[in-house]
Image (cartoon, rainbow, N blue to C red):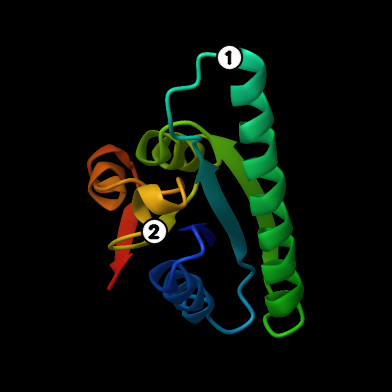
Amino acid sequence: MKCLVAYDGSELSRKALEQAMYQKHDDAPMEVHIVTVVSPNGPYTNPGLYQSIENSLMEKAKAELDSIVEEIQDIYNVTIKIEVLTGNPGNNIAKYAKEHDIEMIIIGSRGLGNVRGFFLGSVSHRVVQQADCQVMIVK
């Protein structure tokens, strides 16, 4: 099974990650893709400044995902892949799932919102509308 967990650091995205681990059955192989989407907010007129902020957000997100992999890799017998994307969260999660033949997307019903700039308002709704696979929304 190939599963995608949309992760933004919120409590609901942590629950989504836990739910993904519950999807593993017996000795069946499982591949979990943990995906974070960053999108700098604000009126950036300087392309260099925008790129610098985007790079900083990506590095921070990657470090957090690496830490999560270390936590769960030893506990569960699953293959874990991480990816940090930029842009529109809902669109990019659905697109990533299609490109990687994901069978199920697990996402929290709400993320951190504009405060941290990862998931925006109706990301889970957009994913449900655009995904070609099963979507589990964790509440």
Taking the spot 68% from the left edge, 77% from the top edge, the residue there is 72
Locate the C terminus by quadrant: bottom left
Q: Residue at x 22, y 41 (%)?
A: 129
**Residue 106, quarter of the rendered image:** bottom left
State the SS at label 2.
Answer: loop
Check disc 2: other Cα within 10 Å, few if <14, some if 14-19, many if 20+. some
Q: Nearer the viewer, residue 83 or 52?
A: 52
Q: Residue at x 43, y 74 (%)?
A: 11
The label nearer to you, 1 versus 2, is: 1
User: Does the image show residue 139?
Assistant: yes
Q: Is residue 104 above or below residue 119?
A: below
Give the CA distance from mark 1 to mark 2. Answer: 26 Å
Q: Nearer the viewer, residue 71 or 48?
A: 48
Q: Disc 1 residue type?
A: Asn
Q: Quadrant of residue 32?
A: bottom right
- In the picture provided, is 77 more to the left or to the right than 45? right
Q: Is residue 47 left or right of residue 16?
A: right
Labels 1 and 2 touching (C-beta < 8 A): no
Q: Is residue 77 visible?
A: no
Q: Amino acid at mark 2?
A: Leu
Q: Which residue is mark 2?
A: 112
Residue drawn at 45 percent across, 45 percent down: 117
Is 35 left or right of 105, judged from the image as shown?
Answer: right
Question: Residue 112's spot in the image, x, y percent?
Answer: 39, 58
Q: Where residue 49 appears, x then y in whole percent?
A: 63, 23
Q: Is residue 108 above or below residue 77?
A: above
- Secondary-structure class at tag 1: loop
Instruction: Find residue 110 and report its horizontal and vertical position in percent.
Output: 30, 61
Q: Which residue is mark 1?
A: 46
